[in-house]
């Protein structure tokens, strides 16, 4: 299933970006920028695990809300974490205006999972 693969790839990238931030960016970014980087990494890792859960849920439930949740979670990771990574690296403040859209995608994904009829 696509969501298990996406989750694994995003976990891999999240670990790599976390290490990159901790080692290569230390001393190059200020405390605020490092905090943005850490938040982006945390949300990416948590929600990439969520994608693996979506893959499993999709295998046990035919509810289409699960598949929609997977795509929303993928979009949310890319927009939320991606905008924070970009903001941390560039300092372009307008990127911060995009971040809540990613957060809304993540919230919608979890809401759809909660609303899905999960039956084995």
Image (spheres, helix red, strand yellow):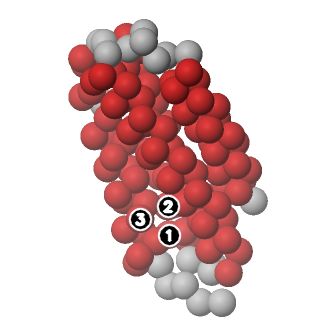
Residue at 37% from the left image edge and 25% from the top image edge = 34
Q: Are marks 3 and 2 in contact (CB under 8 Å)?
A: yes
Front residue of 89 and 3: 89
Q: Is residue 62 above or below residue 105?
A: below
Q: Residue at x 48, y 38 (%)?
A: 41
In this rendering, is residue 110 above or below 2?
below
Q: Label 3's element?
A: helix
Q: How many numbered discs, if any?
A: 3
The reply, left or right, for residue 41 in relation to residue 1 is left
Residue displayed at 32% across by 35% down: 99
User: Percent x, y for residue 42?
Assistant: 46, 44
Q: Sequence order check: which comes first, mark 3 or mark 2? A: 2
The image shows residue 31 at horizontal and vertical percentages of: 30, 22
Instruction: Report the mark closest to the observer, 1 or 3.
Output: 3
Quadrant showing the N terminus: bottom right
Q: Residue at x 59, y 65 (%)?
A: 54
Q: Nearer the viewer, residue 108 or 7?
A: 7
Q: On residue 110, which mark appears?
A: 3
Density class for disc 2 (Cα within 10 Å; few <14, some 14-19, many ≥20) is many
Residue depth check, mark 3 versus mark 2: number of the one nearer the observer: 3
**Helix or strand or loop: what does disc 2 sit on?**
helix
Circle 1 is placed at which residue position? 65
Does residue 26 show up?
Answer: yes
Is disc 2 in contact with disc 1, using a CB cutoff of under 8 Å? yes
């Amino acid at each position: 299933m696509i969501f298990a693969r996406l989750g694994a790839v995003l976990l891999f990238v999240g670990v790599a970006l976390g290490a990159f931030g901790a080692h290569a960016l230390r001393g190059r970014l200020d405390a605020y920028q490092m905090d943005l980087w850490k938040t982006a990494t945390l949300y990416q890792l948590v929600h990439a695990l969520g994608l693996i859960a979506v893959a499993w849920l999709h295998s046990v439930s035919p509810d289409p809300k699960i598949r929609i949740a997977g795509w929303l979670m993928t979009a949310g990771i890319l927009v939320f974490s991606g905008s924070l990574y970009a903001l941390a690296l560039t300092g372009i403040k307008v990127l911060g205006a995009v971040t809540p859209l990613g957060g809304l995608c993540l919230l919608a994904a979890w809401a759809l999972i909660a609303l899905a009829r999960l039956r084995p």
